[in-house]
Image: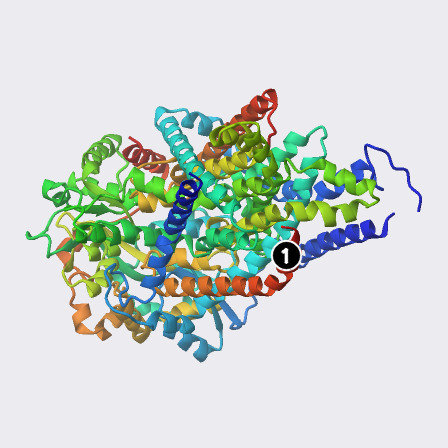
């Protein structure tokens, strides 16, 4: 065989072998990670902790403090939606020790057996949490999760362009604001607000109620500038829209750049939600994750988080320590009467397909 | 008439470049804007560039992106070029089937590729990390390289290769000195495409990345919810400027070589 | 070393060996890393859905039947229409540009080519956001036009179908330019000269000589634009205000919020099969017309 040709073949085979070897070396963990043997009895802090969180949802300096105090290196990755988190966890061991699913997502993950039960002995600081935020319908007994931050979904109003006081979701249908409104690109949240205006529960699975909601939302379509869950801030600050369906934290941040913006929680109530601390099944450093949770639940730490991220803290002891201006802000901490009207989003089970269909119909006319 | 055509042609090209670079200029401009969400110009600042140095997440992600892009482009271009040549030259029974399989990544939606690759890695017990992302990137880049190189191969004058063989060249020499130089623009175009695809991929990377192997697009996408800081504009600008600088430097170096090679025109 | 050489195969190794050498790496890679896992998607498409979205491995056709509904078929049709229009616009822009590029001196051609691709080394999201800054009601373009006195009311350049089209064309332009350029570049311009010598006008020379010879590049470009643009969902969401459902959004949604991987898989398979049908028809027609195909 020709020398040159032999060389080419050799190079080709070497490349393939290197690739195969690379893959082979990758198989360093045993396949069966989900149902691992019980951890050793004497809990030992691991060297690393893998945290998977929403972007900008945990101040860097707090992570540094934890690293210094406990000598643990924190690997921090971020995601942008509950569904992405779910998709990642659903396929198998993701390698993460701590995740921050929202309320309804906790319920789904528990049903799909994707979370580890928490060992509350390792989390004594949970006693600081406000009982109103414990034992919620999506995780009775807090077996798998503890609340981290909470908030509501309401309306962002540009007071420079909107003269009247906004108190109801119905204002979105006011022809004065045609082409100047934006809604969240989330089927549950948006259908939810429409259901609220019709006096229904936003967790309803009643066909008729949902069809009515669909018709009402459909009638609003020509007035909507855009469905957007992420860019509301930009649109409000620039004046592109005057009324926007938005999460309270987003509005607080936008208000820092445009003082005309205020947050309104309409009188019909809206969605109250919470992001929670949870440990995925098969997490390699479960004990360390629980230590970290305990660290985050320290009142001073929770207070600092709440002051920087501007969402509500479910930590009663922490709330005492927060800057009174923030603690007294009715946007972040709404009055009891309206809070009572708010609902937690719950998974609608079989009706998920129906919700998705209606959502597609609204957009696919 | 000639000059009028030429003028129209130049205008067309200029408009295309303006179109392509309009958002880029905006992007660069706003990396100096002293406002986080506002689109209005609030003043010149360098704070986003300095905050970049403090954000280890973004820097790590950028490093990962570049490593993945270079490695996957190299492999995909090599494999893709070989495959393109094979498909062009030889016919065999199930050729169309093989071509169909090759074109699959172009056809199927990205999320399908993402989910199926993740399923494969899970099934094979391969832990997620940088290498799984590289493998996934190579997989979706190969078809693009194949398509571009094949387009170049067609109409290649077969008599040139025959002539070389008649003159006594063996297959490797023929490839090295006749075929490859002729298809080189196609290979380069394919490589450029693969590099671009890899640098900017989000969905497939998201699903196949492991802890600590986040890339820039994944990091940026996760920032959407709370607002993309102009820091991202800053890093994009830096990346852009460095790559352009690198390319210009390479061109300068090649310049002296090119002068000799292009004597024949 | 003395070796038999014949007219058909003048090389030292057999044709089969050559074929294997070139095709095996790519073939094995794709088979292992693509076909196998896609089999899983096929399985998902025939599986049932648990109440919380879990996969129940019991055979059912319901996912496919669910798609056979005017709502989803309309979405599919709308997506194809949008992708076709995008492809045509890309072609109309790219071809003249490639013609211009090919006439530059050989030294500057790589630079001009690179300049096409470089914008796409910035992040996709940032580029899209930059377009939003340009196109919004109080954006750069509107402000400039108003300042120049050309319009009195801002134009609605964003959150509509036209904006989506702009975004798609922008995103896929290099995919059309590169293959067409690669094809044009190797054109023997003496053929054009010969055509002129034989009395044809520039337009005729273009249609009868240049166009047919660059067909492979054109079809490559069309393939690379038309097909991936079908699965696009980010641009319709960001630049179109997420007001219209396209097949890309639909499928994406099934894997995310709707937690219906089964339906998402079925929809994807349907889309893939349709595209393959289109390709097969094209191959048949091209063979019949004796065109060189990709």
Residue farthest top in this picture: C288
Residue at x 46% of width, y 67% of height: B59
Q: Is residue B44 above or below residue A109?
A: below
Give the quarter of the image for residue A142.
bottom left
Residue B157 visible from this viewpoint = yes
Can you identify the residue that label 1 sits on?
A30
Q: Return the x and y of residue B53 as percentages of the image width and height.
A: 42, 73
Q: Is residue A354 left or right of residue A286?
A: left
**As displayed, is residue B156 above or below residue A302?**
above
Quarter residue A176 falls in = top left
The colour scheme used here is: rainbow
Q: Is residue C219 above or below residue A46?
A: above
From the viewer's perspective, tell me whether residue B246 is left or right of residue C2. Answer: left
Given residues C72 and A29, the one toward you in this image is: C72
Check disc 1 and report its element: helix, strand or loop.
loop
User: Label 1: how many residues lie within 10 Å, few (<14), some (14-19) or many (20+)?
Assistant: few
Q: Residue furthest left?
A: A164
Judging depth in this view, the residue of A294 and A234 nearest the camera is A234
User: Where residue B155 sits in the image (x, y, percent)?
Assistant: 64, 35
Find the residue positioned furthest to the bottom: A69
């Amino acid at each position: 065989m020709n020398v040159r040709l032999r060389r080419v073949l050799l190079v080709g085979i070497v490349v393939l072998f290197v690739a195969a070897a690379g893959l082979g070396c990758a198989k360093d963990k045993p396949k069966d990670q989900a149902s691992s043997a019980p951890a050793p009895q004497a809990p030992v802090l691991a060297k690393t902790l893998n945290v998977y969180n929403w972007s900008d949802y945990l101040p860097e300096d707090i992570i540094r403090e934890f690293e210094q105090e406990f000598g643990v290196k924190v690997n921090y990755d971020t995601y942008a939606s509950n569904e992405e988190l779910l998709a990642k966890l659903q396929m198998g061991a993701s390698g993460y020790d701590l995740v921050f699913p929202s309320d309804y997502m906790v319920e789904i993950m528990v049903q799909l057996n994707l979370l580890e039960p928490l060992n509350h002995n390792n989390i004594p600081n949970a006693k600081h949490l406000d009982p109103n935020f414990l034992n919620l319908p999506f995780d009775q007994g807090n077996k798998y999760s503890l609340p981290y931050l909470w908030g509501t979904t309401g309306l962002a109003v540009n007071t420079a362009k909107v003269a009247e006081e906004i108190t109801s979701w119905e204002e979105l249908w006011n022809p004065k604001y045609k082409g100047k409104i934006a809604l969240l690109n989330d089927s549950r949240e948006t259908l939810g607000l429409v259901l609220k205006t019709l006096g229904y529960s936003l967790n309803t699975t009643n066909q008729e109620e949902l069809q009515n909601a669909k018709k009402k939302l459909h009638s609003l379509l020509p007035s909507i500038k855009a469905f957007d869950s992420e860019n509301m801030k930009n649109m409000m600050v620039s004046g592109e829209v005057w009324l926007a369906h938005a999460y309270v934290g987003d509005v607080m941040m936008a208000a820092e750049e445009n003082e005309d913006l205020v947050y309104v929680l309409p009188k019909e109530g809206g969605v109250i939600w919470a992001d929670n601390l949870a440990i995925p099944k098969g997490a390699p450093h479960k004990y360390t994750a629980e230590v970290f949770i305990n660290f985050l639940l320290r009142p001073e730490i929770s207070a600092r988080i709440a002051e920087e991220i501007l969402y509500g803290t479910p930590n009663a002891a922490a709330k005492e320590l927060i800057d009174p201006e923030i603690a007294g802000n009715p946007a972040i901490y709404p009055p009891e009467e309206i809070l009572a009207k708010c609902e937690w989003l719950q998974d609608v089970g079989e009706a998920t397909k129906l919700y998705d269909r209606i959502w597609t119909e609204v957009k696919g006319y | 008439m000639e000059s009028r055509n030429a003028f129209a042609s130049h205008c067309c090209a200029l408009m295309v470049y303006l179109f392509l670079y309009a958002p880029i200029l905006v992007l660069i401009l706003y990396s100096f804007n002293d406002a986080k969400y506002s689109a209005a110009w609030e003043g010149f600042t360098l704070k986003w560039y300095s905050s970049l140095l403090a954000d280890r997440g973004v820097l790590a992600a950028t490093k990962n992106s570049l490593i993945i892009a270079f490695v996957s482009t190299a492999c995909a271009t090599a494999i893709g070029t070989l495959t393109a040549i094979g498909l062009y030259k030889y016919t065999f029974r199930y050729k169309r089937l093989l071509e169909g399989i090759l074109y699959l990544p172009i056809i199927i939606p990205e999320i399908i590729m993402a989910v199926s690759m993740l399923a494969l890695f899970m099934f094979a017990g391969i832990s997620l990390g940088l290498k799984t992302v590289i493998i996934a990137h190579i997989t979706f880049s190969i078809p693009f390289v194949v398509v571009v190189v094949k387009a170049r191969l067609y109409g290649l004058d077969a008599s040139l290769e025959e002539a070389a063989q008649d003159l006594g060249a063996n297959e490797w020499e023929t490839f090295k000195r006749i075929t490859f130089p002729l298809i080189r623009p196609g290979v380069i175009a394919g490589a450029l495409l693969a590099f671009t695809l890899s640098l900017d991929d989000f969905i497939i990377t998201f699903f196949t990345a492991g802890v600590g192997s986040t890339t820039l697009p994944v990091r940026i996408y996760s920032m959407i919810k709370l607002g993309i800081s102009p820091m991202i504009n800053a890093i994009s600008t830096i990346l852009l400027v460095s790559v352009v600088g690198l390319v210009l430097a390479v061109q300068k170096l090649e310049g002296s070589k090119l002068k000799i090679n292009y004597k024949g025109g | 070393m003395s070796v038999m050489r014949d007219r058909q195969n003048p090389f030292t190794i057999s044709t089969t060996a050559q074929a294997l050498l070139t095709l095996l790496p790519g073939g094995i890679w794709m088979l292992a890393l693509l076909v196998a896992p896609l089999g899983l998607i096929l399985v998902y498409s025939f599986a049932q859905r648990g109440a919380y979205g879990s996969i129940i491995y019991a055979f059912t056709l319901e996912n496919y039947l669910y798609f056979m509904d005017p709502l989803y078929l309309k979405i599919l049709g709308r997506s194809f229409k949008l992708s076709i229009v995008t492809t045509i616009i890309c072609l109309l822009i790219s071809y003249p540009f490639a013609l211009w590029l090919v006439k530059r001196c050989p030294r500057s051609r790589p630079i001009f080519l690179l300049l096409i691709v470089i914008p796409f080394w910035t992040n996709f999201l940032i580029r899209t956001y930059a377009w939003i800054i340009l196109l919004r009601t109080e954006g750069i373009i509107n402000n400039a036009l108003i300042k120049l006195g050309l319009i009195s009311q801002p134009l609605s350049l964003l959150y509509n179908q036209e904006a989506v089209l702009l975004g798609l064309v922008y995103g896929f332009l290099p995919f059309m330019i590169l293959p067409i350029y690669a094809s044009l570049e190797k054109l023997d311009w003496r053929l054009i000269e010969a055509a002129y010598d034989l009395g044809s006008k520039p337009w005729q020379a273009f249609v009868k000589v240049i166009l047919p010879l660059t067909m492979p590049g054109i079809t490559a470009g069309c393939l690379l634009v038309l097909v991936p643009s079908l699965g696009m969902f980010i641009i319709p969401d960001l630049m179109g205000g997420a007001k219209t459902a396209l097949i890309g959004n639909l499928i994406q949604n099934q894997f995310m919020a709707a937690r219906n991987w089964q339906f998402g898989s079925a929809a994807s398979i349907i889309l893939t099969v349709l595209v393959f049908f289109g390709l097969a028809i094209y191959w048949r027609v091209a063979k019949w017309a004796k065109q060189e195909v990709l």
